[in-house]
Image (cartoon, helix red, strand yellow):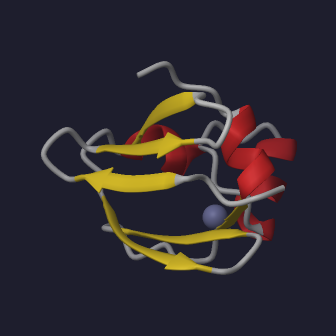
Amino acid sequence: MDAPSALRNSRSETVLRLEWADGERQALSHARLRGACPCAQCKAARLRGVIATVDPDVRLERIALQGYGVQLVFSDGHERGIYPWDYLRELGGTP
Ligand SMILES: [Zn+2]
């Protein structure tokens, strides 16, 4: 899947905005993104049914492009999640 045509981290609104080539737009809150972290550790916790309590004040601090997606670095220090483009798109989030 191709990268979005636009990717913008709005710190004031605490949302990550994406726009795709087909015109589809998304706005994903930082807390939602943190809660959906696809790293092995977070995935395993969700599979075990551990209710991950995400701090609603968590912030997306940094985005590192990885070709097939983005590595997201959060204000709680967690930076293991690499979010493929198709996974981000599946998260929905109406602007
Ligand atoms: Zn994680």
Q: In this view, does 24 lie to the left or right of 41?
A: left
Give percent across and percent down for residue 64: 51, 80
Q: In which quarter of the image is residue 9?
A: bottom left
Q: Which of these two is toward me, 36 or 65? A: 65
Residue 45 appears in the figure: no
Quarter-of-image position of residue 48: top right
Q: Which sits in the foreground, 69 or 51?
A: 69
Note whether residue 32 is visible.
yes
The structure residue drawn at horizontal position 66% and vertical position 80%, both measured from the top left corner, is: 66
Where is 24 relative to 59, above or below?
above
Q: Of residues 83 and 79, which is closer to you in this image?
A: 83
Q: For the point 41% across and 22% down, which residue is it?
A: 95
Coordinates of residue 93 in the picture (x, y in percent): 53, 25
Viewer-closest of 80 and 24: 24
Quarter of the rendered structure image containing ligand 1: bottom right
Task: State the residue lying farthest toward the left.
Answer: 12
Question: What is the quadrant of the N terminus in the image?
Answer: bottom right
